[in-house]
Image (cartoon, rainbow, N blue to C red):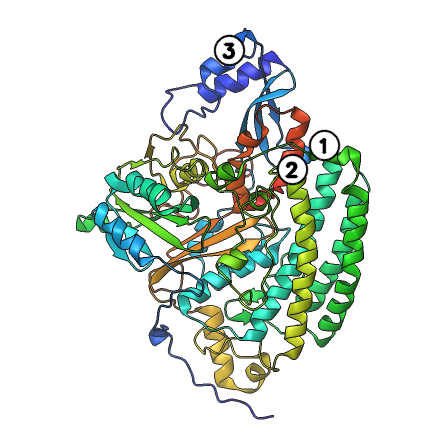
Amino acid sequence: MNQAAVEKNTVRRHSGEPSEGRSGGAFPAERIEIVSEEGAGGRKTMYLQMGPQHPSTHGVLKLELELDGETIERVVPRVGYLHRCAEKLGERDRYVQAIPHTDRMDYVASMTQNLALCEAVEALLGLEIPLRARLLRVLLCELQRIASHMVWLGTHALDLGAMSPILYCFRDREEIQDLFEEACGARLTYSYIRIGGFYTPPSPRFFSWCREVLNRLPEKIDSYEALLTENPIFIRRLKGVGYISAEDAIAYGLSGPVLRGSGVARDIRVDEPYAAYDQIRPRVITRDEGDCYARFLVRMEEMRESVRLCREALEALEAAEPGPYLAENDLVVPPPKEDIYQDMAAMIRHWIIAIHGFKVPEGEVYRAVETPRGELGVFVSSDGSGRPFRLHYRSPCFVSLGALERMAKGGMLSDLVAIIGSIDVVLGEVDR
Amino acid sequence: MAVRRWPVPNWEEAVPPKIVVPRGLTIDEAVASALAEAFSGRIYERGVVVPPAKWSDAAAALRDDYGYRFLRDLTATDWLERPHRGEWRFELIGQFAAVPGKTTISLKTHLEEEEAAPSLVSLFPAAEFLEREVFDLMGIRFSGHPSLERILLSEDWEGHPLRKDYPVTGYENWNWEGHR
């Protein structure tokens, strides 16, 4: 550790009046002296910056660490490197224009992010979404959950030294991405779910293809489990690491698999059903151990559960009456393309909705969806105009990072990598 | 193929009329009215509005007496015009969920321009990052927060971007050469 660099860093951060809000004071001045002198308890501690270019931080997460040997005394996450003003731009733009911003928040699970915003605005508008569209939303979001968990599994295992799972996971995620490409034409940032339904119905081939993929998935999940679940090295890297109790998990606002890995059965899909989750009921998977291995098992089980939900949704879709994938509301939902090409008034309506957008009645709403990472909440406040007065995203990883110190304190530096992986952090969503 | 006749819309009148409480959300009326009575607040359709001095007390009551142990979200809105009418400027909104349970409630308070809100960090550790975000982007201070500093923007950033008087392009021109 370069002493001069440490001092330069700290001097820069602590120059000037230490006013509230400008101090940068995770490591106040007296802390820094510990770096070279005998610190608290007569032990030397080291200050270490991990990231933002560290490969196992899954993006641009910077962690300021205080280490006693290899034991972690303190972790301070520094986020914001990917801040793209999604909320400020959301206030500038019309409701429809905010959807592409949500794609870029959690780029590993874009479909669920689209859904969160659309559900919130639809709730404010009082739109009734047809059953087919709601079922298709469930199908796509559960597929997205499997794809996202595959990315998590591959990178998490790679962080812990297992080289091969990432190859299998990305190979199999490719199939789901091809499926999404068939449905909407995009592979990563979809913007497929729109306010009122979908911007286009999926092709007829999508459903048969989807069934094929779903038939192949369970044995693929088995193969991941064969590689990792009983692997003694993997278990020793995860078991007992990053423990957080159920009470702490609730108090720190953790959500998703991290919370369920601590034994708290809280799942937005069950507690506040959105889309068609009131008909396709997921089983809430919990483990009581509260460590990284429990979170691993929860996610693996969730993938199997998602396959089951996808099958159910697909069957329900095929049994449902044929009809449009769009709500019936002339003010909000543009007419179907065939009408636009044949009817002047329909084209004018399409233009007006595309150019002026639509007005949303005054009011405010907070709607949450269960993304692969936990509770993504969208707060929309409307003043009755065509643009949101305030658009706020509650991102699960941002809140989960607040509990990182609680999980990592007293552990080893190498365990920190496992803990970050088990939170499944995506920095695009943290910084928004 | 028969084509549906689409009436030409009138943009000026095109406001959908109704507000619907979303599906699956239930608000416990008894908790809301008890809270409003105890902390001299008032009920609105999704929760309770309390005075700023009672903000943390009301949150503590929610957590300890009614089981709303999960702080889902904390955010604020900026009502720029209201101070001209002699009213408050910021609205602080917290969303709470009962664990275990399926009920949610939101708690609001109204703040003057330079007024600090009591911090909820000692009650809900999740509030630490959320309050820092509100401070960073909206400029609301929280008294009693252990380290209230910017979280998403850099430490030398000027202004608070989510305020309504902050322009979308920022206060100054910025270029990629690294100079402001």
Say what amino acid the circle numbered 1 marks: Arg
Vertical relation: B67 (above or below) B121: below
Other-residue count near label 3 (Cα within 10 Å), few / some / many at <14 / 14–19 / ≥20: few
The quarter holding residue A240 reads: top right
Residue ID for mark 3: A40
Which residue is rendered at x = 62% and y = 60% of the image?
A141
Mark 2 residue element: helix
| Of the image marks 3 and 2, the number of the one nearer the N terminus | 3
Give the x, y percent position of residue B81.
25, 52
Vertical relation: A1 (above or below) A312: above
Question: In this figure, what is the number of numbered marks?
Answer: 3
Say what amino acid the circle numbered 3 marks: Ala
Residue ID for mark 1: A237
Say what amino acid the circle numbered 2 marks: Cys
Observer-nearest residue: A328 or A103? A328
Question: Mark 3 or mark 1: which is in front?
Answer: 1
Observer-nearest residue: B23 or A19? B23
In the rendered structure, the answer to whether residue B129 lies left or right of residue A241 reads: left
In the rendered structure, the answer to whether residue A363 lies left or right of residue A44 reads: left
| Of the image marks 3 and 1, the number of the one nearer the N terminus | 3
Q: How far apart are marks 3 and 1 (CA)?
A: 30 Å
Verify CB contact (< 8 Å) between mark 2 and mark 1. Answer: yes
Q: Which chain carries label 1?
A: A
Q: Mark 3 lies on which chain?
A: A
Verify CB contact (< 8 Å) between mark 3 and mark 2. Answer: no
Q: Do callouts 3 and 1 point to residues on the same chain?
A: yes
Which residue is rendered at x = 20% and y = 47% of the image?
B40
Question: Mark 3 or mark 2: which is in front?
Answer: 2
